[in-house]
Every structure is written in C-alpha cells, then in structure tokens.
Amino acid sequence: MELLDEAKAPDGTVLKLYRHDGAYTIRVNNIELMSTRRHHSEDRLAELVCEPIRTLKGTRVLIGGLGLGFTLRAALGTLASDASVVVCELVPKVADWNRNTEYPLAHEALVDHRVDLRVTDVAKVLRNPEGAFDAIMMDVDNGAESFTTRGNGALYAGAGVMMAVGALRPNGRIAYWSANEDSRLVHTMREAGLHVETHTVRAHTTSGAWHTIYVGHLRAR
C-alpha cells in the first residue's frame, strides 16, 4: 500500500490517502473511511434524493462532504443539465486530491459547469444558504457518531437538522448517510417535520458492510 499524502482536519485528526492495486482509500487511524472499490452506498445517497427531482427546472442541491466524489458524480448523472450543485468539503487537501488530475477521483465532476465546490464547513452554507435547496445530501462523517471531526456530530442533532430543514424549499428532500442504524436521528428528523424513509444499502453492490441512508421529505407548507 502506497501512502500518497496526508491531511489534517480542523480538530487535528489526520486523514491519509493511499493507493493499492489501482484503488484509492482515505484512512483515519489505519481504519478505512472510504474507498474507490466500495462506494455503492454513496451512489445511492444521491440517487434516492435526486431521482424524484430530476425533471424539475433550475434544481438546486447541496452536498455536505466531497469524500472521493462518488455522491457528487451520482447526483450529476441524475440531475438535469440546468441544475446547480453546491459541494462543501471541510478539509482543503481532500478537495485538492479530487482536483488532482493524476488521481482518478472527482476531477471531471468538479469541472462540470453545474458544480460549485466550496472548501468550508457545510454548516456555514446551511446558515446562509443564498436561496433554498430542493435537496440536501449529508455525508460529512460516519453519521451522528462522528469519526473524523468531532464537531460534525452537531449536524445530526436537533439544531443541526432544523438548520438543514430551514434551508429546504417546500417539498424538499434531505438524506443522511450513516455507517450504522441510528434511531435517534430518525426521531430528530421527524421532530423537525420530515417524513422519514430508511434504506439499508451495502458498501459494494454485492458485498461489504451495510450502511443506512435516512431520507426525509419536507411536505409543502
């Protein structure tokens, strides 16, 4: 396994980018956080939210967490040509890895005319959304039990979910990716006025760990 680079999250957590047999992984404390070999659940995160709005005109969506770019690519593959996709990535080097044309990651997706990449905390965009979103996809960590950056957990708590709901348009949709089932998150989403669907999805199409995607639909007010 070849170590390509390292990055520090705001709280000091070290993320490491590796390459092995053509696959790329990001690891924290030698634990795999994401991989180009296993990204089915990241794809489904985007598909579950974007499929119902693919025919809308001028769709505006937000992705919290760039990762290795799979949710972004799936969203672009689903949304119309006039859509607008804001992507927030907290760690500058993670954005750089994806921009790097030497790595087969998200370079092509990031130069798509629909994409606005912002190297910032997604909470800042949620507080000042500059116009509401039709859909929001949150994959900034392992879920409410933050693994890479301790502050990420606040996005899955009551105030964080309410902030996200406040940035949605009527009939908007929001989805949270989680490494594990989280009944507290479901309760929090319902308390925020969302109708919640739970989807259990494998990391790979046919194998690997099971992840959970919670999709909330904001009924028209």
Image (spheres, helix red, strand yellow):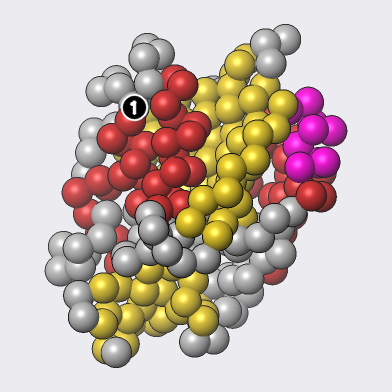
- Queried whether the magenta region covers residue 190, the answer comes back as yes
Query: Residue at 59% of width from left, 22% of height from top?
Result: 172
- Queried whether the magenta region covers residue 60, the answer comes back as no
Quadrant of residue 5 in the image? bottom left
Mark 1 is surrounded, within 10 Å at the Cα level, by few (under 14), some (14 to 19) or many (20 or more) other residues, namely many
Q: Is residue 84 above or below residue 203?
A: above
Query: Residue at 54% of width from left, 72% of height from top?
Result: 9
Quadrant of residue 69 in the image? bottom left
Query: Residue at 84% of width from left, 33% of height from top?
Result: 191
Which element is circle 1 on?
Answer: loop
Q: Quadrant of the C terminus?
A: top right
> Which x, y percent locates residue 71?
40, 47
Query: Residue at 30% of width from left, 73% of height from top?
Result: 24
What's the amino acid at mark 1?
Leu
Left or right: residue 181 compared with residue 58: right
Q: Quadrant of the N terminus?
A: bottom left
- The residue furthest front is 206
Q: Is residue 76 above or below residue 139?
A: above
> Which x, y percent locates residue 56?
40, 13
- The residue furthest left is 102
Viewer-proximal residue among 137 and 151: 137
> Which x, y percent locates residue 62?
49, 37
Magenta part of the chain: 186-194
Viewer-proximal residue among 198 and 63: 198
Quadrant of residue 95 in the image? bottom left
* Residue 172 shows up from this direction: yes
Left or right: residue 140 compared with residue 24: right
Q: Is residue 142 above or below residue 219?
A: below
* Residue 92 shows up from this direction: no
Q: Which residue is mark 1?
A: 79
Please give the count of numbered marks on the rendered protein: 1
